[in-house]
């Protein structure tokens, strides 16, 4: 796991998203990002704000993170994220988690919210008959388009392996559950890319994220 040293100050968070910017980078916690050098991550990122999803906030001593996005209950990651979370970074959640965030934040003006949604496809219900929430990446992509971003670069969106490289139980081999999850997410990403193109925008995925683990 990355250990935070000196956090890099966000570059765009003082003006964005209120001032629309056309390019943004989204970094996720896939192994390609964790195993890359800081120079390679900087070279891969676009000029524009950088959004870190979930545990990818740990890259804040490598990349200047302008926004941290997590759509699960923030208490699951809040304590873990504190050493990596710059006090000027914006925050993105979904609307049904705002009440929880309001109890965590001294400065509520940093927080932005998007609509919550669930994957209601047949066969995806849990033992209680509930559908899983759409993974955090997809509300992030919808929100970015909404605030005027026209080009998004995805780093660390590998969709492979089991668990997270930031956790002790990570494996480069995907078990059956993760194979299903990644298949669903790949399909969702293809749909989202088409949605972007229909609106004159585009999503590109870092080539390293598409390679087999080394």
Image (cartoon, grey):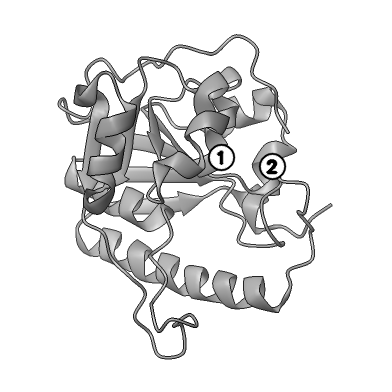
Q: Residue at x 78, y 47 (%)?
A: 168
Q: Residue at x 18, y 40 (%)?
A: 147
The label on residue 166 is: 2
Q: CA distance from mark 1 to mark 2?
A: 7 Å
Residue 13 position within the rendered picture, expressed as x and y whole percent measured from the top left:
30, 20
* Residue placed furthest toward the bottom: 122
Left or right position of 124 against 142: right
Give residue 144's quadrant in the image.
top left
Nearer to me, 24 or 125: 125
The answer to whether one can see residue 149 in this image is no
Give residue 160's quadrant in the image.
bottom right
Left or right position of 172 against 137: right
Left or right position of 144 against 81: left
Quick check: 196 above or below 180?
above
Quick check: 156 above or below 56?
below
Residue 118 position within the rendered picture, expressed as x and y whole percent measured from the top left:
33, 70
Q: Identify the secondary structure beneath mark 1.
A: helix
Give the quarter of the figure containing the N terminus.
top right
**CB contact under 8 Å: marks 1 and 2:** yes
Q: Identify the secondary structure beneath mark 2.
A: loop
Q: Residue at x 34, y 29 (%)?
A: 104
**First in residue order: circle 1 vs circle 2:** 1
Residue 12 position within the rendered picture, expressed as x and y whole percent measured from the top left:
32, 19
Left or right position of 33 against 204: right
Residue, disc 1: 55
């Amino acid at each position: 796991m990355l250990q935070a040293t000196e956090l890099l100050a966000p570059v765009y968070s003082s003006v964005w998203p209120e001032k629309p910017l056309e390019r943004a980078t989204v970094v996720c916690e896939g192994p390609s990002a964790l195993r890359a050098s800081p120079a390679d991550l900087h070279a891969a990122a676009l000029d524009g704000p950088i959004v870190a999803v979930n545990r990818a906030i740990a890259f804040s001593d490598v990349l200047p993170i302008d926004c941290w996005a997590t759509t699960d209950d923030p208490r699951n990651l809040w304590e873990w994220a504190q050493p990596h979370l710059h006090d000027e970074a914006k925050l993105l959640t979904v609307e049904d988690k705002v009440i929880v965030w309001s109890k965590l934040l001294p400065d509520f003006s940093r927080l932005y919210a998007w609509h919550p949604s669930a994957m209601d496809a047949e066969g995806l219900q849990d033992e209680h008959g509930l559908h899983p929430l759409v993974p955090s990446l997809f509300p992030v992509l919808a929100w970015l388009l909404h605030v005027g971003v026209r080009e998004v670069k995805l780093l660390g969106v590998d969709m492979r392996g089991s668990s997270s490289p930031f956790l002790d139980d990570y494996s480069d081999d995907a078990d059956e559950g993760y194979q299903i999850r990644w298949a669903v997410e790949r399909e969702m990403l293809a749909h989202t890319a088409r949605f972007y193109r229909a609106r004159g925008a585009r999503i590109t995925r870092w080539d390293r994220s598409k390679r087999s683990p080394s």
